Image (cartoon, rainbow, N blue to C red):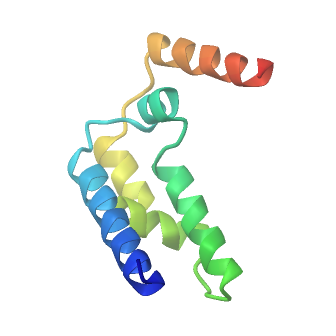
């Protein structure tokens, strides 16, 4: 496959992932962290880091807005729920497993 095609396909898949996450606001970041070991904030950090590596001036907050589809504070007010005791316990258990590996 030609490299430019690969980049276009990866970009299209990334845009679809963002659209999916923006549509499914019921999925909380802590759930993503427990199940997939990444969340929307991780994506924003990776996006900002990729920009910095390429000399593009996109900071973390701007990257968050790209990932969330709105300012993070707005998303948080509208969609973020307080983590349940079960979610926190699952997250802690996952972190302990990671530390042991």
Near-viewer residue (29 or 72): 29
Q: Residue at x 27, y 62 (%)?
A: 16
Residue 69 visible in this rendered orientation of the protein: no
Residue 96 placement, left or right of 47? right
Q: How many marks?
A: 0
Residue 54, percent across and down?
A: 65, 85
- Spot the residue most to the left: 23
In the rendered view, tell whether residue 81 sits above or below residue 86: below
Residue 20 visible in this rendered orientation of the protein: yes
Q: Quadrant of residue 8?
A: bottom left
In the rendered view, tell whether residue 57 sits above or below residue 36: below
Residue 18 placement, left or right of 86? left
In the rendered view, tell whether residue 37 sits above or below residue 59: above
Residue 35, percent across and down?
A: 45, 28
In the rendered view, tell whether residue 72 sits above or below residue 98: below
Residue 99 placement, left or right of 14? right
Q: Quadrant of residue 79?
A: top left
Which image quarter holds the C terminus? top right
Residue 1, percent across and down?
A: 41, 77
Q: Residue at x 78, y 18 (%)?
A: 100
Q: Residue at x 46, y 50 (%)?
A: 40
- Spot the residue most to the front: 1
Q: Residue at x 48, y 11 (%)?
A: 85
Q: Quadrant of residue 14?
A: bottom left
Residue 70 placement, left or right of 48? left
Residue 11, percent across and down?
A: 38, 73
Near-viewer residue (68 or 101): 101
Near-viewer residue (63 or 35): 35
């Amino acid at each position: 496959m030609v490299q430019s095609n690969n980049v276009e396909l990866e970009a299209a898949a990334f845009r679809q992932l963002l659209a999916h996450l923006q549509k499914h606001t019921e999925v909380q970041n802590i759930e993503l962290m427990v199940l997939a070991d990444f969340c929307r904030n991780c994506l924003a950090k990776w996006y900002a880091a990729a920009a910095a590596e390429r000399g593009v001036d996109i900071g973390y907050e701007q990257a968050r807005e790209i990932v969330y589809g709105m300012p993070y504070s707005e998303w948080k007010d509208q969609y973020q729920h307080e983590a349940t005791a079960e979610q926190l316990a699952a997250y802690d258990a996952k972190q302990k497993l990671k530390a042991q590996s």
